Image (cartoon, grey):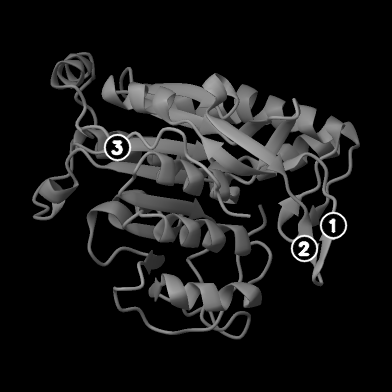
Amino acid sequence: MTMETTRARTQADPQVDPQARAQAQARTPATVPAPRDLPWLEQLQGRTVVVKFGGNAMVDPSTQRTFAQDVVELWHAGLRPVVVHGGGPQISALLDRLGLEVRFEAGLRVTTPETMDVVRMVLTGQVQRELVGAINAHGPFAVGLSGEDAHTMTAVRRPAWVDGRPVDIGQVGDIVDVDGSAIAALLDQGRIPVVSPVARGEDGQVYNVNADLAASALAVALGADRLVVMTDVEGLYADWPHSTEVIERLTAGELDALLPELASGMLPKMEGCLRAVRAGVARAQVIDGRTPHALLRGVLTEDGPGTTVVPDDEPGPQGPGGEGDGA
């Protein structure tokens, strides 16, 4: 299902209020230098970049610290980063400890009401707090919120499609509406929003939303220039499992043709990239979050790592599908 509406695309002046940025910089320890000597950096000034941080990479404390440093460096470089995080390994670990079933269909977690309680607890009470703390070790930047807050994300129940048939997977949602005004206000104040992928429904239920698709929807609503999906594989493999060669660049049309062939773990990531690029995001990337400073390389270099998806009017090499990590 594609997004039906975006109430607040927030296409106002993307520059952070100069006074707010100056005040934030004045309160920030000078421990994280901004990247320098990058000729294309001026083109990215004031641009919004939505970063999804997930996979098993985010479980490692040192990786999390490096990621936080990279996010702050992007801010210092004049970009407007927004972090959307997953938490699949942490959710599965707590479900195991509680004796609750861990099951996936088509790459999506089967979410019973009991599972939903654990999802909210882990995402907003544990993972988000850890990321906010790691970013704020460098200054007064990060503010945490979930898709429930200020009705930022609205979702409807979605099935998983298995062998061409819909399968009920419980309180799993697909985003149909995004109100980005609260996040845009935080960006204008010089903050770094950290968003948990939990959404409200018009039916009164709360939904577990795949973080890749949540980041994609938010990137579209905010008019972001970049979507970066950080996970624990190197990118989209050209001939998995026979080869680990990564497809470096794809057009939206080429990716659309590949989606039916993709493994379940990679499917929502590439689906999110496709949705974002087709809705106006200039570039979407899947990169390996386990590699130190992969985020900086992905955003600030022309030949960044991983797989990059571009609009159809930009050339990209053809290639078959690949494997990916579970959501």
Rendered image quadrant of residue 82: top left
Give the labeled residue for mark 2: 161
Q: In this image, 54 relative to 121: left or right?
A: left
> Residue 67 location in percent, x, y?
40, 41
Give the labeled residue for mark 1: 167
Give the labeled residue for mark 3: 11
Going from N to C along the chain, the mark reached first, 3 or 1, is 3
The answer to which of 74 and 152 lies nearer the viewer is 152
- Crowdedness near tag 2: few (<14), some (14–19) or many (≥20) residues, C-alpha within 10 Å: some
Residue occupying image coordinates x 42% and y 40%: 221
Question: What distance separates the C-alpha of mark 2 from that of mark 1?
Answer: 6 Å
Rendered image quadrant of residue 323: bottom right
Q: Which mark is residue 227?
A: none
Say whether marks 2 and 1 touch (CB < 8 Å).
yes
Q: Is residue 170 visible?
A: yes
Q: Amino acid at mark 1?
A: Val
- Crowdedness near tag 1: few (<14), some (14–19) or many (≥20) residues, C-alpha within 10 Å: some
